[in-house]
Image (cartoon, rainbow, N blue to C red):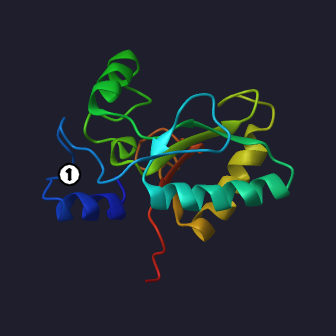
Amino acid sequence: MNLHVVTMLLLLGQPGCVGPDFLPPSLEVWTGPSYREIQARPDALEALDALFQELERTGNRPVVISGFRSYERQVELHDRDPKWTESPGCSQHQLGSAFDIGWMGYGLRSPHDHELWALLKELSSDYGFDVTYDGAENIPAEPWHLNYVGDQTK
């Protein structure tokens, strides 16, 4: 878990993970490309929109696969595949700040993955995002997973 998430959780009075009743203070619906309704924090959505505009200008076709997840949804996903999902309450998705990004028409597995993932890594910090899971610390790499941390220079 990155420092911004831990700091946010500590500010919320949480010991490192959030409980089943936690909801971000505000969630809005993403109006950009996605396969289903995606919700997230408004500040994260605004930054994601700017990032998507940049990606689209370079000829990429990004799509949001996942955004906010409730505790209950994280339980379902973690029970199904614990290798690729955080424990319930410990997922950045439950904070409303994380997104999984794919290529329109393919999802997370496309012939364009490496190109898109390289661009996400290169551009994400310019828009306040962190590619959280880079393969370090014995955690599988998830180059499609972005977490909004905001402008770290403020």
Q: Amino acid at mark 1?
A: Gly
Residue 4, placed above or below residue 151? above
Q: Residue 73 placed where, x, y %? A: 34, 26
Which of the pair 145/68 is nearer the observer?
Answer: 68
- Identified at 51% across, 59% down, the residue is 130
Which of the pair 144/83 is nearer the observer?
Answer: 144
Residue 113, placed above or below residue 117? above
Can you see residue 7? yes
Residue 46, placed above or below residue 136? below
Which of the pair 77/41 is nearer the observer?
Answer: 41
Q: Residue 148 placed where, x, y %? A: 47, 58
Residue closest to the far top: 80
The answer to whether 48 appears left or right of 153 in the picture is right
**Which residue matches tag 1?**
16
Q: Secondary structure at mark 1?
A: loop
Q: Residue 10 placed where, x, y %? A: 18, 62
Mark 1 neighbour class, 10 Å CA radius: few under 14, some 14 to 19, many 20 or more: some
Q: Residue 25 placed where, x, y %? A: 29, 54
Which quadrant would the C terminus be assigned to in this image?
bottom left
Q: How many marks?
A: 1
Residue 28, placed above or below residue 128? above
Can you see residue 148? no
Residue closest to the far right: 59
The answer to whether 10 appears left or right of 42 in the picture is left
- Identified at 68% across, 47% down, the residue is 117
| Image quadrant in which you'd find residue 2 | bottom left
